[in-house]
Image (cartoon, helix red, strand yellow):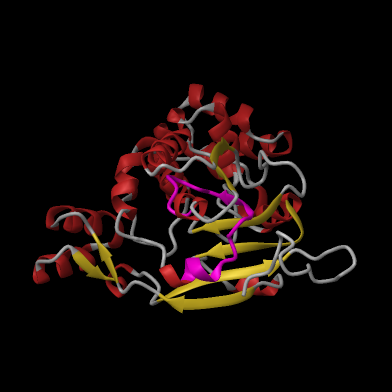
Amino acid sequence: MSRKATPHPDTHRFSPADLDRFDDEALRTFLDPADGGVRPSLAGLALQGRPVLATRVRAALPPEARAGFDSGLGTPADPRAVARAGQSLVRQLFWPLLYWCAPDLYLDLIAGEDLPEKLMEALPIDGRTIADLGAGAGRFAIPAARRALRVIAVDAIPALLERLESRARAAGVGNLEARRGSFRSLPITDRSVDAAVYCSSLHDRGPHGGPGAIDEAERIVRPGGWIAVVWPESSGWLLKRGFSLLTTAAEPRVRFPDLETAERLCREFYGAGAARWVRQHGTCEVPAAVVGRPAVGIACIRRVPRPDGGTPPAGSGSGTPH
C-alpha cells in the first residue's frame, strides 16, 4: 500500500481524531508497535483529551504495549506537546488514513503509475500461485492474474479490496481472490504459494513492513519459491537479508488524467515544486524525476531455500527469477 518514493504528503488532511474511523482490526494492524511501528507512549500522548478513542486504541494494542500507552496518556503535557505528538502520529499513519478515508483519491494518485513492462516480464509468474501482499486496488494483482494460475490478493483496507474486485471483474479476471489481512498475520496457509510479491507496499519498519513481514512471507511460500519486493522504498535492509537487486527500464513519465488533476495531486503529495513544474509546462505528463519516481524499474528478490539447500527443477511450478 505504501509509496515507492516518499512524496510530500498533506498531513493536515487528517488529525488523530480520524483514527476513530478505523475499525478494530485496522487499529490493531496500524498501531502495532512491532518492528519500529507507532510507539504506544506517543499514541497515548496524542490522544490526551479523547477518552473514548483512547479506550478503543488501548484495547487494540497488544497487552504488553498498554503500559506504555497509559504512560503517554497520563503524562502531564501542555496542548502544544499533545499537538506535536498528534502530528507525529498522523505522519506515521498518513497512508493508512488516506487509503481508509479517501481511497478514490489514492486511486487518482496512482492511476498513471503503471508497472514497468520489463519488470513484470522479469518475474516468473506464468502458471504459478502468487500472493500479492499489500495489493491495494490491484496494480500488480490484475496484470499478474493474466499470466498466473491463481493470485491471492491481501490488503488491510476493505475499501481497496472492494475496488480491486470490481476492477478485476471489469477486466474479465476470474482467477483472483481478495482477502483482508495484515503483513504480520497473512490469511494464507503455510507453504501454499509459489511466490509472495510486495508491490510498492513494503517499508523497512512497522506498521508497513519490517523483518516480521518478511518472516511471514517466508511462512506462506513453498521451499524453492521466491519473495519479490517491487519498488522497495529502501533496498539496503533487504540486501542484508539475502535479497538480490533486479533493475529494468522504467516508464519515464507519470500520466495524470488531466492538467487540473496533475497540478492538484502534485501539490498535495509531491510538494509545491512539482505543482509549479506542471503549471510552467502545461502538461499532465510529468517526468518521473519531478515526483521522485525511480528512473529504473526496481525489485529485490530472494528465493526461499529448500530444506536440502537444492535448486528446484525446471518446470516444477516454483522457480527462481531469471
- Is 143 in front, or is 42? 143
Does 155 appear in magenta? no
Q: Is residue 22 left or right of residue 266?
A: right
- Is 315 in front, or is 287? 315
- Taking the spot 61% from the left edge, 30% from the top edge, the residue there is 60
Q: Is residue 277 left or right of residue 59?
A: left
Q: For the C terminus, which image quadrant?
A: bottom right
**Residue 33, x across and y down, in percent:** 63, 46
**Residue 52, x across and y down, in percent:** 50, 21
> Is 26 placed above or below 35 here?
above
- Taking the spot 63% from the left edge, 71% from the top edge, the residue there is 321
> Is 305 placed above or below 245 here?
above
**Residue 59, x across and y down, in percent:** 63, 27
Does 137 appear in magenta? yes
- Is 129 in front, or is 267? 129
Magenta segment boundaries in residue numbering: 119-140
As drawn, the residue found furthest toward the front would be 315
> Is 150 placed above or below 122 here?
above
> Is 30 placed above or below 123 here?
above
Q: So how many labels did they put on this image?
A: 0
As drawn, the residue found furthest toward the right would be 308
Whether residue 202 is visible to the viewer of this picture, yes or no, is no
Q: Quadrant of residue 79?
A: top left
